[in-house]
Amino acid sequence: SISSLISEKNKLKNLVIFSDFKNEIKKTKEMYKIINKFEIKNSLIILDKLSKDKIYKSVRNIPSVKITDVNHFSAFDIVKFKKIVFTESSVKELEKRYT
């Protein structure tokens, strides 16, 4: 199940949680800096709707990263990517769904 896959990523220290994105990130170059700083290449970024709207354009052209929201990812996505990135709000949404 998705819960156990996320738990396994956490055990392997491949789970990253950011605070919600308050500001819009418009440029791919800015997003590359964040990805490199936090070593989140080959990542699935799962966001709440508001954060996704703020960073989608800066991430969509980065080949090693997939961005989605909490309603549109699968177990396959979790297995495919090395790291999983959440925002605080997306974690809360997932907790509501799976508890």
Image (cartoon, helix red, strand yellow):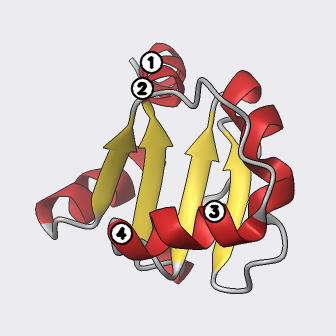
Report helix, strand or loop for mark 4. helix
Question: 50 left or right of 34?
Answer: right
- Residue at 58 percent of width and 55 percent of height: 45
Between tags 1 and 4, which lies in front? 4
- First reached walking from the N terminus: tag 3 or tag 2: 3
Quadrant in which residue 82 is drawn? bottom left
Circle 2: element type: helix
Earlier in the chain: of badge 2 and badge 4, it is: 4
Q: Is residue 4 visible?
A: no
Callout 1: SS: helix
Q: Do the residues labelled 1 and 3 touch (CB within 8 Å)?
A: no
Kindly identify which residue carries mark 2. Answer: 88
Distance between mark 4 and mark 3 Cα atoms: 11 Å
Examine the rendered structure and indicate whether residue 59 appears above or below residue 22: below
Q: Distance between the residues labelled 1 and 2?
A: 6 Å
**Residue at label 1?**
92
What residue sits right under mark 3 in the picture?
30
Q: Which of 70 and 41 is in front in this view?
A: 41
Earlier residue among tags 4 and 3: 3
Three-letter code for the amino acid on which mark 1 is drawn: Lys
The total of numbered circles placed on residues is: 4
